[in-house]
């Protein structure tokens, strides 16, 4: 089963994906915006929308009404995907077939959804000053709290060294200073700008009646937009010489993050080979990194690799003793070299292929994975469906994986640690 | 194997339950339309089960041993369990809590190969003396990693304050010095005692034929021999009454992290605990849920943000709340929380608040059934404690204002301990 599409009167695309294994209906509006200097005033918008609407001026009133609608879940989100921000407003509600006597839950929930997105609570025609103040403060503490999670902190530092001159290195909420500079006026203007100009999709997934939902959405979500604005194509990072950066922090386990730039992205025909490459190197417990660094040498508690396949980047992360830095990075370098030479066993290839393919099959059951896949397609500009990826993976050879490996260039080795070495 | 079918028509769910010749309880949740198949094999043996009486004799083990055993079950000198799962395209995992150990896999294909492997590797240890020694340094790394996490430090601080040296306050992985005392023989003995199929439950969910599944499990169990189910008496101690002094430590954090621990009475038995958990989930929505006036006042005043959360645990040995999150004013926040509890004790709750939040919980219960894994894990945990997860739904729907107020009156807001991780100067 794949999405079907309809275009609403204002040009927004409505994507529908029935999933009969769900007892709920998910509805989400997704607005895409480039991650740049206006990140702070962009990212704060959904946070302000959740504070109140014309009919429910406070979060408490809004939440109380949602609770009455059998705990209809409502959430907002700000996601960084490639060099874009994805602003989300979403609800999820129980399909009324499971509820006693209730026949209009969907319509009542959609009324709230419409209010949150289009009719926020205002004072003098702008967001309320107290709400702007409160959400600025919350976002600033969130930016600061990055320090509390050492792995995420190390990852963020690595990005800042990888591409200091690019939006990609920014926090999705912008900098503390940029958040401080947001005012009622600028936030309100940005909200208007986003509604009118951001590329926008509405996703509906789960258990629903197709006609009823299409009607419930199209009759409520009409707002004037400027047509035609599309997303910019992802721009890969420049390849630069390898740099080793060590930063001190008083922690007992060091955090290693290595950034590998390959410029093979979801847009490339080599994408299936890229995910196989990553799986063989570090995606699983049977992968080279886990086996060689942790199992054979006991150097790490965790080690693995992940992809940002929109940017064509791979990140290798590990938790190791400060004294094991040299040995660990050498073993990792050996594994990268083995990948380039095609020193890959038949088992490594087939196990990884099979893990990836059953993983893809399992994604059919998972609503959030289905939505994530669709967002990636929108941003990368190339639609990989579950069946098309499963089929493409069948055809990947060790030679293809080797071709990807030769593109992969270790660019940053970042290590955050206390004493030792 | 014979099995019984229970129907939950309101939820649109069915459960099949049978018992294999080995004594293993098998629970199956048919999930037509799902591609994913999921199984968990679990035993009610966790980090707090360090002292037991076996045939009249006391058997005491070091902290961290249940978790150590969980790690070692994956060792096999002939092969790699993880790699065989990988070759089937499945992912596998395991975890240890205070009260149970669970092994699981998730797959879309080769389901029966995976199930066979799960039953075999958990029921037949293959680890070696050398492997046990090597494992100590791997677990030591794990302990170190957690030690750096301010969230973990503040949480352990709260548990320690509430329970002193009771096993519930220990790190589930133990301490580095405990690891040295764990050896091959001890692990074998623990496996023999606590992994007997008569104690364990296998829970499976997916688009699978029930008849075929139960026949398959019966055949797998028939091939093996198990020792007689030993008579084990749990000697988990009752914690000392009263709470200790507040705890605070400095770490590299951007602003204070807090955990407010509030002790509650232990449950009479697991059944009482399960009922209490439901009453408390309703109480918490009314007290500090996102639609409560109190939550919104704290949020507007900037005392809490999205990082705020509450955990409630109830067992026959201990029971407590842990309120946690980031805040600039931990002392004041703790004070506010306790005062609001006292206010509710004095003023009671309104029927309207109860109705709204009960509807919310009914909806959330149904929503949670979307997730195969979470449903299976909840069924397994409840079964090991003599309960029936899906039957909780009817009990939830019947909760009343008196239930919540009765619980509220039994709380003692003075049984509190504040744990804080402060930024370094």
Image: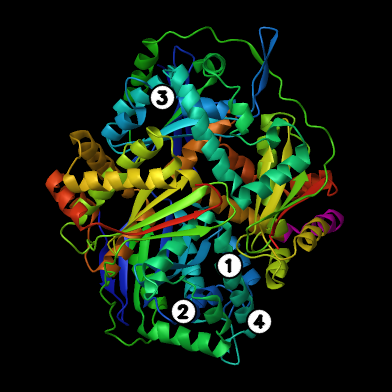
For residue A158, which quarter of the picture? Answer: bottom left
* Residue A340, numbered circle: none
Residue B88 visible to the viewer: no
Chain where mark 3 sits: B
* Residue A144, numbered circle: 1
How would you rate the neighbour count of disc 1 (Cα within 10 Å): few for under 14, some for 14-19, many for 20 or more? some
Badge nearest the viewer, 3 or 2: 3
Q: Which residue is mark 3?
A: B75
Q: Position of residue A145 (x, y in %)?
A: 58, 63
Query: Residue at position x 58%, y 81% from top?
Result: A180
Q: Is residue B344 magenta?
A: yes
Label 3 – label 2 distance at C-alpha: 50 Å
Badge nearest the viewer, 4 or 2: 2
Secondary structure beneath label 1: helix
View extreme (bottom): residue: A124
Secondary structure beneath label 4: helix
- Is disc 1 in contact with disc 4, using a CB cutoff of under 8 Å? no
Q: Which residue is mark 4?
A: A130
Q: Which residue is mark 2?
A: A42
Provide the residue span drawn in magenta.
B340-352
- Is disc 3 in contact with disc 2, using a CB cutoff of under 8 Å? no
- Per the picture, the main secondary structure of the magenta-coloured stretch is helix
Chain where mark 2 sits: A
How would you rate the neighbour count of disc 2 (Cα within 10 Å): few for under 14, some for 14-19, many for 20 or more? many
Q: Position of residue B324 (x, y in %)?
A: 67, 54
- Is disc 4 in contact with disc 2, using a CB cutoff of under 8 Å? no
């Amino acid at each position: 089963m794949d999405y079907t599409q309809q275009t609403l009167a204002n040009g927004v695309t409505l994507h529908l994906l029935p999933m009969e294994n769900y007892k709920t209906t998910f509805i989400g509006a997704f607005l895409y915006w480039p991650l740049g200097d206006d990140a702070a005033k962009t990212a704060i918008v959904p946070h302000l929308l959740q504070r109140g609407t014309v009919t429910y001026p406070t979060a408490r009133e809004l939440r109380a009404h949602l609770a009455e609608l059998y705990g209809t879940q409502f959430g907002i989100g700000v996601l960084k995907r490639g060099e874009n921000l994805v602003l989300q407003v979403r609800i999820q509600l129980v399909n009324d077939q499971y509820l006693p006597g209730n026949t209009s839950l969907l319509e009542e929930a959609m009324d709230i959804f419409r209010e949150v997105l289009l009719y926020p609570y205002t004072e003098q025609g702008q967001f309320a000053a107290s709400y702007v103040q409160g959400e600025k403060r919350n976002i600033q503490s969130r930016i600061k709290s990055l320090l509390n999670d050492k792995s995420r902190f190390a990852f963020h530092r690595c990005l800042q060294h990888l591409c200091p001159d690019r939006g990609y290195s920014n926090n999705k909420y912008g900098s503390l200073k940029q958040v401080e500079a947001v005012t009622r006026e600028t936030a309100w203007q940005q909200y208007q700008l986003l509604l009118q100009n951001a590329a926008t999709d509405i996703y509906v997934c789960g258990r629903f009646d197709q006609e009823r939902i299409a009607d419930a959405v199209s009759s409520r979500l009409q707002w004037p937009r400027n047509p035609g604005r599309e997303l910019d194509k992802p721009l890969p990072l420049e390849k630069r010489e390898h740099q080793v950066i060590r930063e001190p922090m008083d922690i007992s386990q060091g955090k290693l993050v290595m950034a590998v730039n390959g410029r093979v992205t979801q847009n490339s025909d080599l994408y299936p080979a890229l995910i196989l490459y990553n799986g063989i190197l570090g995606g699983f417990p049977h992968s080279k990194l886990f086996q060689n660094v942790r199992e054979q040498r006991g150097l790490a508690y965790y080690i693995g690799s992940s992809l940002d396949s929109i940017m064509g980047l791979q990140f290798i992360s590990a938790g190791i003793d400060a004294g094991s830095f040299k040995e660990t990075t050498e073993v990792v370098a050996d594994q990268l070299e083995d990948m380039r030479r095609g020193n890959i066993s038949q088992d490594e290839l087939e196990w990884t292929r099979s893990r990836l393919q059953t993983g893809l099959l399992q994604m059919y059951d998972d609503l959030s994975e289905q939505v994530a896949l669709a967002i990636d397609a929108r941003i990368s500009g190339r639609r990989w469906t579950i069946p098309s990826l499963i089929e493409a993976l069948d055809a990947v050879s060790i030679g293809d994986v080797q071709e990807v490996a030769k593109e992969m260039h270790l660019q940053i080795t970042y290590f955050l640690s206390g004493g030792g070495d | 194997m014979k099995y019984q079918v229970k129907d939950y028509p309101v939820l649109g769910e069915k459960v099949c339950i049978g018992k294999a010749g080995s004594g293993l309880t098998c629970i199956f949740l048919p999930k037509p339309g799902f591609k994913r198949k999921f199984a968990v094999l679990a035993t009610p043996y966790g980090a707090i089960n360090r002292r037991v009486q076996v045939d009249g004799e006391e058997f005491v083990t070091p902290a961290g041993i249940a978790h150590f055993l969980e790690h070692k079950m994956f060792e096999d000198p002939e092969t790699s369990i993880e790699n065989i799962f990988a070759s089937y395209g499945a992912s596998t995992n395991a975890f240890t809590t205070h009260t149970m150990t669970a092994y699981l896999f998730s797959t879309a294909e080769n389901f029966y190969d995976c199930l066979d492997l799960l039953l075999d590797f958990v029921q037949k240890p293959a680890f070696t003396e050398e492997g046990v020694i090597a494992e100590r340094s791997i677990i030591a790394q794990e302990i170190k990693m957690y030690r750096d996490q301010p969230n973990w430090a503040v949480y352990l601080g709260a548990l320690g304050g509430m329970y002193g040296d009771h096993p519930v306050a220990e790190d589930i992985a133990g301490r580095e010095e405990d690891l040295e005392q764990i050896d091959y023989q001890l692990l074998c003995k623990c496996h023999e005692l606590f992994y007997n199929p008569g104690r364990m439950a296998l829970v499976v969910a997916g688009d699978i034929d029930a008849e075929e599944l139960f026949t398959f499990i019966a055949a797998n169990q028939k091939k093996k021999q198990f020792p007689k189910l030993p008579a084990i008496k749990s000697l988990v101690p009752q914690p000392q009454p009263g709470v200790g002094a507040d705890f605070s430590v400095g770490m590299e954090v951007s602003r204070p992290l807090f955990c407010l621990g509030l002790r509650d009475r232990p449950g009479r038995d697991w059944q009482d605990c399960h009922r209490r958990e439901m009453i408390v989930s309703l109480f918490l929505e009314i007290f500090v849920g996102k639609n409560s006036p109190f939550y919104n006042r704290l949020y507007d005043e900037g005392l809490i943000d999205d990082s705020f959360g509450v955990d409630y645990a109830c067992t026959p040995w201990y029971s407590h709340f842990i309120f946690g999150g980031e805040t600039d004013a931990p002392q004041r926040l703790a004070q506010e929380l306790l005062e609001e509890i006292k206010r509710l004790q004095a003023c009671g709750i309104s029927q309207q608040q109860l109705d709204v939040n009960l509807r919310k919980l009914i909806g959330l219960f149904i929503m949670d059934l979307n997730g195969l894994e979470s449903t299976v894990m909840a069924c397994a945990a409840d079964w090991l404690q003599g309960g029936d997860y899906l039957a909780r739904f009817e009990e939830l729907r019947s909760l009343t204002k008196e239930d919540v107020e009765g619980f509220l009156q039994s709380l003692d807001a003075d049984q509190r301990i504040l744990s804080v991780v402060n930024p370094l100067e």
